[in-house]
Amino acid sequence: MNTPQNNYRKLLLIVTTVLSSTLVSNRAMGADAIFELDAGADRETDGTFVFDTIPSNSSTDFANGKTFTVLDGSSHDVSGTIDHLTDGLGQTNGDSCCGPDSESFFAGPTGAEDNLRIQLDLEVNVPIAEINSYSWHNNSRAPQIYNVYGAINPNNNAPDFDAAGFQESADLAALGYTLIASVDSMSLGGAGGQVGVSITGDVGTYRYLLFDIAPPTWQVGTRATFFGEIDVVPAGPVSVPFKITEFHYNSELETVTLTWDSIPKTSYAVKYSTNMEDWDSDLDDGVKADDGDTTTSTFDVRGLASASGKLFLRIERN
Ligand SMILES: [Ca+2]
Ligand SMILES: [Ca+2]
Ligand SMILES: [Ca+2]
């Protein structure tokens, strides 16, 4: 029966054998953004910032391990790599520079007056409760100034984005983006320290979050912010699509290795068919899920294909 539940539970793969703490808040759009600056002895140096009102940076939030892409502008030539924004850690000192292993991600000197546009792909639509961003610098590179936009299905064909479509003059609304909040922690006074920003309230449900980041402007010129982490906290359970993520056929051994999204402590039946109508046969009716969020298993498919060399595989959650 073709119910939504069955669609969710079944997968089909077609195979052919071939200072002190300071707090400021402001309201933007339907979401609230609050900022806090920790300086002096309030700065933690173990990679986890602790604030009075802002949640600590997290290694278990929904964005952790997900991918950021630079859409417009470029990172500084001695910036840390952009994956540091989703590695769970904040900086361990107030001048975490320089080189790819540095925990600080920041924009480049060429065109430093221009905004940097980066985008996070959450991979699925997420009802968002919080977007939290963290920075640390001893002085001018601490403040955070950005607009954050959300999109479910941008017109610019995610994931094959055309970066040219995201230059500063680009009309983000026309590309399918909604402004979630405007953040400007310069209202804290612009002092150095650990800055935490938390956007909550009517954030919305999005797959893509685009951060349009401006460099704080000082007497010394523009200084790109040292960002250490950006977290996303869902408002509730997130429905992750059930799908086969990797497939490998070994023609010598006549084996198929499959990797699929799975839930620990769950078992799965791997069925096969030569005509996509009869699904009574299985390769294994009880594959135990691996720990983590995917399972990989190898199956012997010797002699199972149809005369024309076709074999269809389907995974069902038991
Ligand atoms: Ca603190
Ligand atoms: Ca994180
Ligand atoms: Ca980080």
Image (tube, grey):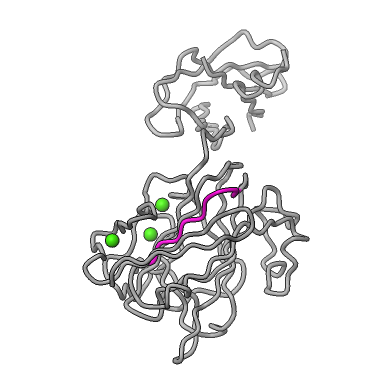
* Span shown in magenta: 195-203
The answer to whether any part of residue 235 appears in the image is: yes
Ligand 1 is found in the corner quadrant, namely bottom left
- Residue in view at x 25 percent, y 65 percent: 42
Position of the N terminus, as image quadrant, is: top right
- In the rendered structure, the answer to whether residue 52 lies left or right of residue 13 reads left
Pick the residue in front: 22 or 229. 22
**Which is the main secondary structure of the residues drawn in magenta?**
strand
- Is residue 196 on the magenta stretch? yes
Q: Nearer the viewer, residue 49 or 248?
A: 49
Residue at 45% x, 61% y: name it: 197
Residue 101 seen: no
Q: Is residue 223 left or right of residue 182?
A: left
Q: Position of residue 87 (x, y in %)?
A: 38, 55
Residue 77: where, in percent of width, then height?
Answer: 45, 78
Residue 158, placed above or below residue 294: below
- Is residue 146 positioned above or below 248 on the image? below
Q: Is 250 placed above or below 200 here? A: above
In the visual, does 215 lie left or right of 173? left
Please tell me whether residue 186 belongs to the stretch shown in magenta. Answer: no
Locate residue 139, reporting x and y percent. Answer: 35, 80
Placement of 72 over or under 202, stated as above or below: below
- The residue sitting at the left extreme is 41
Residue at x 54%, y 56% (from the top left corner): 32
Residue found at the very far right of the displayed protein: 174
Of residues 44 and 153, which is closer to you in this image? 44
Residue farthest to the top, as pictured:
280
**Residue 72: where, in percent of width, then height?**
61, 71
In the rendered image, which quarter is residue 172 located in?
bottom right
